[in-house]
Each structure stands twice: as C-alpha cells, then as structure tokens.
Image (spheres, rainbow, N blue to C red):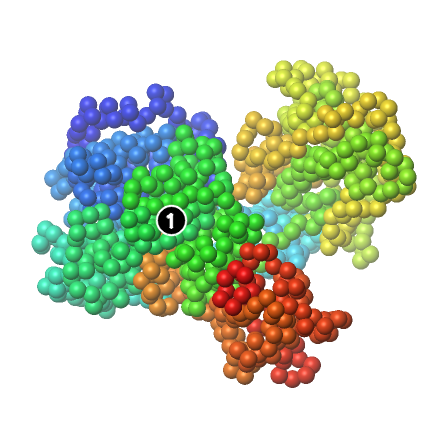
Amino acid sequence: MTDSVCFSNQEASLSLRHLLSPPSPPTMATDSMEIDDSLYSRQRYVLGDSAMHQMAQSSVFLSGMGGMGVEIAKNIVLAGVKAVTLHDTKQCETWDLGSNFFIRKEDVLSQRRRVEAVCPHVAELNPYVHVDMSFSALDDNTDLGFLRRYQCVILTEARLSLQKRVNEFCHSQQPPIRFISCDVYGICARVFCDFGEEFEVFDPTGEEPKEVFIQSITQDNPGMVTCMDNQPHGLQTGQSVVFREVGGMVELNGTSRQVSVLSSHSFAIGDTSQLQPYTHGGFFVMVKTPKMYRFETLERQLCEPRVLTPDFSKPEAPLQIHAGMLALDTFQEQHSRLPNTGCLQDAEVLLKLTEEVNAALKSKVSFTLVRCLSRTARGALPPLAAAVGGLASQEVLKAITGKFAPLQQWFYLDAIEVVKPLQPLSAEEFSPRGDRYDGLRACIGDSLCLQLHKLRVFMVGCGAIGCEMLKNFALLGIGLAKSSGEVCITDPDLIEKSNLNRQFLFRPHHIQKPKSTTAAEATHDINPDLQVEAHLNKVCPATENIYNDSFYSSLNIVVTALDNVEARRYVDSRCVSNQRPLLDSGTMGTKGHTEIIVPNLTESYNSHRDPPEEEIPFCTLKSFPSVIEHTIQWARDKFESAFVHKPSMYNSFWQTHSSAEVVLQRMQAGESLEGSFQVMKLLSRQPTQWEQCVAVARLKFEKYFKRKALQLLHSFPLDTRLKDGSLFWQSPKRPPTPLEFDLKDSLHFAFIVSTARLFAGIYNIPYSERDLSEEAITRILADVKIPEYRPSEKCIETDETARKPDQIKMPLSSEEERDAITHLEQAIATDRVTPERLRMSPLQFEKDDDSNGHMDFVASASSLRAIMYSIEPADRLKTKRIAGKIIPAIATATAAVAGLVSTDLEILVALELIKVVGGFGFESHKNCFFNLAIPVVVLTEPAAVKQTLIRNNIYYTIWDCWTVFGHEDFTLSDFMNAVREKYGIEPTMVVHGVKMLYVPVMPGHSKRLKLTMHKLIKPSVDRRYVDLTVSFAPEADGDEDLPGPPVRYYFSPDGETP
C-alpha cells in the first residue's frame, strides 16, 4: 500500500470527500483557531484546550470496519481529531447488520464495501473532522511508508503477523507513530498499546488541583504542614505543591516543595528551620508534573505481557485470555480460519495450542474459557465490542494528546459469565440461521436470542448513555415487534448543539427536536424490526397515572440513563415496589459506573447513599469568599435573585392581588400582605428606558464592588482581633479592596452592559446594538450621579452555621410598612400601575446561549468580586462549568469520551441485561467502576440483599412487601388482626405517607380502630391499594418499636379497583 494507492480509487475518494465535507469546512487545526464551545463544551472540561488543539492537528488511520472498528471510528470522530482514514477490504454481509450500526440492509443487498457503507455515516458525525477511506490491501507485502502521515494507527480484525509488522514500523519511527491493536472474538476481547520508548504525559490523572488552606507549618527539619479543619490534602509522597499567601513564613510563597505524606491531612516539606516562624493563613496547590511512560513492542510483550486486571475476583483471567487468544492467532495462521462453532475437534486443537503458549507464560490454562472461546470465536457480542472499542478510543486520545495515563500495555475483557451456563446446549442451538443475529446466536444461542426479542424494556433518559443503550438494543434485537417485544423510552428534553458531541444518534438538523422521538427514529434505522415507543414525560410522582403499577407489571426490565441522583432514587423505588430488575449507569468525565439491581438477589440503588454535597456557608458567600467557587456561586445567586426570583414573586403578587387600589386599602388598614414590601420597592424603582437600565447597572457596580468592601472594612478594620487574640482577617478570610469604576476596564464595561441588558429583559425595555457601544454607555454614565457613601452600623453575619433569611417571610418594621404604602400611593398617583407595569418577564438561566448575556453577567460579576478579594479570577469556561453545574462528558466513556466514557457503561449494562434475561445466578452478575484516565476498570459482585431480623425468626428484605386484602367495611382493627394472623407479629403503629393512622400514645387514636380503612385513608376512586409503614412491638418493654417491610393494603378482596 503506497501513498498513491492508499486512497486507491481517486475519483471515488474525491467525490466522496466532496459529499462528506461542507464547501468551506470548519477547522480547529491550529492553536489560533477557536474551539467551537457550543459543540465541544462538555468535552473541553474533560480534556482541556491544549489537548483539544493537539487532537485537531492529529490524523488517525483505522483499519477494520467490523463492530469494534466502527465503534472506535464513531468515538474519535465525535471527539474531534483532524482527520481519520477508514480502511477495510470486506463486503457487507447479513452478519454485519448485527454488529455494525452503520450498515443497512440495502448495503448488503447491493454488495457494497463495508468502508463505503460506513464512511458517510461516520463523516456526518462531526463537520470539523475530515474523513476519507481506503479499500486497498493491507498485508505482509504492503509498503508501510504511507503510515508516516498519521500520528496514530489502529488495527482491528488484523492477523497477529500483520499487527507485529505494523507495530515494528510504527515503533521505529522518529517520533514514534502511536500504535493500538484491538481484537474481539466471541466472548473475549483485547487491546494492546505501544506509544514508543519514551512517551511523556503532561497530566496523568486529569484531576483539577485544589486550593487547600493551611492550619499550621512547623519551623523544623522537616517542616510539617497541617491542613485547616483536618481537610484531606489528596497528595501522594513525591508530588509537589506551591505555596501562596503564607503569613510569617513568607519565604515559602511562590516556591514549590516536594511532599512526604504523614497523614490524610498533614505532610512534610523538607527543612523549614531557617525560615521565619509561621504566623497565619496561606494555602497550597498541587503542582502537576509530567510523567514518562516506556512501551515495548508487541513482539516483546507477547511473552512477558503487562496487563490491566479489571476483575480482582479472578486475577488470573487476563493471562488466561492472553494465552487463549494467542493460541487462536496461531490456529488462524495454521488453518486460515477460525474454529467452527460447536466443533469439539477444533476446541481440542485450540486447547493444545493454548497449553503450548502457556508453557512460556507459566500460567494456568482455563479449559472452560478456551472451550467457550473456541465455540464463540466466529460470533459477536455487540456490547463487548463496544466496551473495548470505547476503551481503545480513549487510548487513541491519550496517544495524540499526552493527557491521562496510558494503558500499559494490554487490556483483556471476557463475558464468560454470559456463556458458561449455556455449555450443555446442543450445537444446533448456536448454528447460523442466515439472519442479522447469527453472530449473537453463535455466542448465546437461539433460545436466549428469542428471549431478547420478546423483552419489554423501559428506558428513562435518551442522552449520551441512552443513545448508546438504544444502539445496543437494536444490535441485540431487544424488543422486536413480531415477538411482541417493545422498548419504551422517555425524555422531556430537546436536542441542543452541545449534545451532538456525545449523543451520536442526533445530527445538526435535529436541534430543538425531542430527544426521545428522534432517538427512536434513529434506532429504527439501525434495526427496522425494533418496536420503540417514545414519550416526552418525566418519570416522577406527577406521572404515576402514566407509569403506574400496571405499566411496570408489563415490563421485564428497567434501564436508567439519567444525570441526577434524585431521579435515579425515584425510579429505583418504583422498581423495588413492583419487583422489577433495574440496570443503572452514569458517567462524569472519564469516570463511570454500572450497577445491576435484581429482585430478591441484590440491594437496591437506595440501599446506599453518597454523602451530601457540602453547602457553602451563607456568610462566606455574602461577605467572606476565599476561593473562586465562592465568587462564582455568589454571581449565580445574584442572577437568580435579581432576574428570576424577584420578577417571579412580583408577578405572583399581582396575579393574587389584581387591583392596586384594593391592595393599598388593605395595607392602610394594617393588613400584612406577604411580599408587599419587596413588590412595592420593585414597583417604585422600575426603569422605563434603556438609559435607566444602564444607570441601575452602574449603581449595582458601586454597591457590589465598592460599598460592600468599604462597609466590611468599617465593621472589621484590618487590625480587628478575635477574642483569642488572633487576627480577624486571616486565612481563609480575605480582606476586600474597594474597586474604583473605570469604563476603560473591559471587565467593568462587560458588567455594566450585561447587567443593563438583563434588567431591560425583565422589564421588557427595548434596546439596539448601538445602545451597547462604549460611546453610548459613556454618554449615559456621564449623567449618572453616585450618592455619597455613608457607612452603616448594621450587623454583618459571621456565623458559618447561620442560614440565609427568607426576606419575604420576615416581619416588616413599621418604617418598612410605611415605605411600602408610600411607594404604592405614589405609583397610583402617577399612573404607574398599568397592566404592563404590573408584569415582569423572569429569565431562566441559560449557560449555552452566548448571545443572551447571562454568562456575561455571571463571568464579569464573579471576576470583579474575585479581584476585590484578591482571588485569582477563573476564565469563562471554568466559570460556565461551575455556574451551570455542568457534568464534564466525553464520547469515549458513554461508548468512553461523548460516547467514550459511556460506551463502556452501556455495554456492560447490556451484558448484564443478557444475564438477567437468562435468569443467571447472583455470582454471574457484575457491577463496574472505571476511570479511563488512569486507567482503571474494576468489576465487582453486587451487594447481596440483606435480611433484617424483626424478631422470633421473622426476617424481611427491601424486596419484601406484605399484603392484606380488605373490603369496604374493613376496619383498622381488622387490618391489625390480619397482619398478626398472617405474619405472626403484632403491629403497634400504622402510617400512610406522612399521616399517622394509628399511634397508641396519640390522643383519640384508640377510637380509630373502629373506623374503616376507606374512611381513614380516603383513597381516590381508581386506587387499588396503598403501601403502609407498620411498626411492631419490641420483645422487651421500653425498647423501640421494630421496623418491618411495607404492608400493601388492597381495598378489595381480589385486589382490583373497588
């Protein structure tokens, strides 16, 4: 394959390029070019701009357009490399429809080349990436010189001899061409990486360095640093930190010291005995130091492989798979084919070859693994191909960016738990039928395939993970119409441009269309036999009339593809209540997890709770910020208060009280109306012209960035001391410096313009582009009078436990009441209570629209406050991430970065789904946690369901629900007797939701025993049952009542609607 024949069909290649690229293709090819934040914003938070620019200058060669190859192609094109050449020599076959989501039935019928079928679909994923193709032979006789134009070469579906030859060529180049090879045969998959003898990584972990405040530093050899409030430092011995703002021991400021960890909150930094004594304050930040990694060639690594161990319950597995797959390579070299499905003779040959390989590796042969590998080698498990493809894609990005620790050097993954229980089945069960599922059938058998076709699945969420899930459902044939199966999906969101970087089923022309219906159509294109029903609903208590018990009882399994914990907890509770298995997964940046929840086997999602996020104390936000996160949150709160909350409260007040005259009469009569003071203040200060909006913005600048500082320094002068004699203004408290307004300062100008625009927005005041010019703003501000500052003697909150007061519900002083009445009287007298003046337009914070001024306000306000407190301001990107609570995401981790992290997840989830359908035992199921940055992949058994003892050998689990069937005249006493007779234990307390139906010590509750359950609960006419919380009598007097499972009370004897 020479340079001239690499793109062998020049006419076809040129016309295809013309088809796939816009007339003037956008580019990110140089550092001077801006990154398209509207597309790449979530990924920028993971990789950073330096890595993004590296990617935009890198070209990749990818050979093999099978299931794993197309997965890698999808992920790296979404991520945004400069160019990708797709190479493949095979024609489309029916078999491919079950593993390659970009090949269609018409491609098979017209006998198109796989690369020709796939290339247009891959190219349309990202207009910034140039995609071309080659179908020339790549073999032992090919001149490999053409590979010098690429920074990374990936081989899939290549014989081992070719892998070794290409790897030797890549390794020998200066600089080395990064080499990755991937294989997947049936239930086993592998990835190999060689990035050269010296590969420097500038950021091995990708974790953002934290500022940690200092409690003390000893004057000693070595000096010991202790973190404030025993905060964990997160350091490792050998890392370095840089010091800032240290009081007393000022020689440390700006210097870097290597640390030796002493405890989770202290470390040594070498000799400090000759430095001045530490007095107060200061913080340190970890210094990221580059790390060098050394790689060996594939040839050298075959006998002494360095492997990543994902499942510590079977640490021997990677070497066993290594031996089995090397034996499979030898089998192919000797027989020019793979072992035949179910052929015992081929299995014995492969076993013998494995034993020969193992003699050099000195590891134990797994006969079961080798036999399963032999039986399934011709098959394809789409989830496995996607999982390994996702991980390999992340390694491609590492190879071309130097960001994150690379894989050294082998990764193996198997799905033996899926096929091991199927060994007794006959060979006929796995033989081909000539349809798209032959590859899958060779692995899991026809019976399990049919069960997948019949599945009824409910998936909540159609984002990045949801798209990957649906792709797998389509390839696996889950929910086929002809088999009475169905996949029901729901998501209320519309597609945004930033979604296109990860959610690969969506294209630019889908923007502002519903995610669920669009994803359903795209999934149907992959497999037209799929039955997909798309909803636009949230799954929450408000939609229980739709997603009721009857709905859940019709399902086989529930899958969550959600981005928030509360929604997961709710869906989990519904699955437990209805005894339905749940597959959960989630990602953040390069990290991800999967969790399998099976009725009566495992704990549920709600069985464990993460610690709540720490809230920033109110006084810190209001007066004493110490880190940039505080100033960003302050700016975000100011936006919510001024442009969302106050306008909403204003509208709500006037919707409740439509007549200003009536409101005035009631206030004059001494009646207290909630929110009246705040509403009248807004009414009296309401601007009517653009010039007034600019003036308000200027006064806000004065208030926020000058007077606030002056007031704090008046209340707490710089020499203020606490009761213990220590300085008030010491770390983490920072004394503010008042800012003098300067319109020539771009930050000051940005604050004025953005603030004025937002006020104009809520008051419905028009303005033009000319009004935003520096000339126009200068002219307006020349007439703005700034009142003289007079310090107040008001109390400033310093208690970190104090909560923010609710201004609306605080009692008004007589002066405030008089002011409110005066404001309203003046408004009525001057005809300022028209319907237009009694209505405002609340904003909704939208971080991704740069034209609306929302982020302009937050970024400028945050930066100005940071400067006022001597905090280093954040750039707009970081401000946007924190203010918008954006979850970093990348396509490799959802398939693993906007596919990349998630791909691994949904794949592993899909494998678990097959196990659930097959009714496999507890020991076969696996939860997964991974961080592709490090990289680490950990597979663990799920937590077994716990049995809780009530007493007298009566146990229950979270999956238990006791039942009592009643009737119209069934009393509370009857209910308690029924529980005692049926379950052998006496109820002592009965609660429905937050309503206590029966508590013996409560006055009058004994009389309730004679009341009917209908009268006590008052169910709606269509309600079949209620779940009641019941406590039971303890064994000894004085002990607490004992908890038990929920007791489901049916209102009719047959459990139907009465």
Residue that mark 1 sits on: 487
**Quadrant of the image containing the N terminus:** top left
Residue 403 visible at all: no
Residue 1013 at what x, y percent from top left?
62, 67
User: Residue at image x 49%, y 40%?
Assistant: 493
Q: Is residue 765 left or right of residue 72?
A: right
Q: Quadrant of the C terminus?
A: bottom right
Residue 972 visible in image: yes
In the structure shown, which secondary structural element does the residue marked by tag 1 occupy?
A: strand
Is 916 placed left or right of 771 in the picture?
left
Q: Residue at x 57, y 76 (%)?
A: 978
Please name whichever residue, 663 or 253, is drawn nearer the observer in this view of the structure.
663
The x, y position of residue 998, in whole percent, is 67, 70
From the viewer's perspective, tell me whether residue 904 is left or right of residue 748.
left
Tell me which corner region of the image, top left, top right, bottom left or bottom right, holds residue 334.
Answer: bottom left
x then y, percent, for residue 751: 66, 28
Structural crowding at the residue carrying mark 1, measured as other residues with C-alpha within 10 Å and reported as few (<14), some (14–19) or many (≥20): many
Seen from the viewer's position, the closer of residues 592 and 163 is 592
Expressed as whole percent of the image width and height from the top left, the position of residue 990 reads: 63, 70
Question: Which of the 4 quarters of the picture holds residue 668?
Answer: top right
Relative height, residue 431 to residue 471 (above, below):
below
Kind of residue at badge 1: Val
Query: Of 531 and 378, which appears nearest the observer?
Result: 531
| Residue at 39 percent of width and 53 percent of height | 457
